[in-house]
Image (spheres, rainbow, N blue to C red):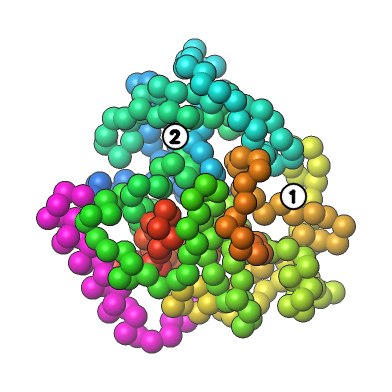
Amino acid sequence: MRHCFKGMKMKAAISVFLASMVFSVAATAGVTKWLEFELRGGHIILPATVSGIPTQAILDSGAQFNAINTAFMGKHNLSYNRVGKIRVQGAFGVKVQDKLSGLPIQLFGSETTFDQVVGLALGHHSRGLLLGAPLFYGNIMQIDYPGKRLRLVTRDSMELADFTNIRMVDQKGSGMPIVQVTVEGKNIWLILDTGNSAGVVIERTLARDMGLIKQQNGITGAQGATKSIHVESTRVSQMQFGPYTLENVLVSFNAEGNSIRLKNQYSQTGTRINGKRVSGLIGYDVLKHFVLTMDYARGQMHVGLPEE
């Protein structure tokens, strides 16, 4: 993916932004140390400890809750207080899951206790946690994709509103942050999903309106737990993401006769997305170029480049 940046002044503004943030948080100790992460298939994997047991945590900005892997619990004979039930919209249907409380967690070098954690099947027992919206609320999250690191910043350490350069919707209650991008001159709202390894995924109806359905498009199959889904892909000449123009961007959508579900696979049933017409998802293949600084609860975000 080739990207061009309009206005070289933007680079200077980013450097000033990062420098001022580091200065302010250093003065107030309102920032965690950088935590290095791994990227596997476009997913952010963090080190964490649960009940004194080292494990891996998946960071998923589109998930509405934190979750613990039931396979991890079974492997280590762990049990926690059940405090209720929750209906979870999974990839291929709805399931009722337990909500658990009193989980001793060590993350970002600090020890804490997680409550209202959902017990879910998250694959291999080596991945103990899924970290979703509750981790993002209450603080500013900074993800440096090129540097493979992230940290949390307290709100009293910086005024992110002064540096916001992309429209983002406050998603209180839904846990799904939404940003506005421009594709081929058309403004659309996409869910910012760090748990999605794709670039841009949109609905077929929008693809048709934009003239993206072409005979030469590639069609691939994606195998799910109970069925296969066919996805059609093409490339668009330009996409505007914050102050940046990206070129030759891969856009995917459901093939004819296939359906697409835009909500994150770890979402609670019955939630809405602030009345916005959400057209798709934006994931790793676009985000990997940038440093993202986000305040989910206040709907503020800055898109920047890594420091050189």
- Residue 23: x %, y % from top left: 16, 61
Give the residues drawn in magenta, as a range.
1-30
Report whether residue 6 is seen: yes
Badge 2 amino acid = Gln
Q: In the drawing, what numbered circle is on residue 203?
A: none
Residue at the spot x=43%, y=81% of the render?
5
What residue is disc 1 on?
222
What residue is disc 2 on?
56
- Residue 177: x %, y % from top left: 51, 56
Report whether residue 221 is seen: no
Residue 137 horizontal side relative to residue 240, left or right: left
Q: How many marks?
A: 2
Residue 35 vertical placement versus 225 (above, below): below
Residue 122, by quadrant, is: top right
Residue at the spot x=29%, y=77% of the render?
13
> Which type of secondary structure does the marked residue at label 1 adopt?
strand
Quarter of the image where the C terminus is located: bottom left
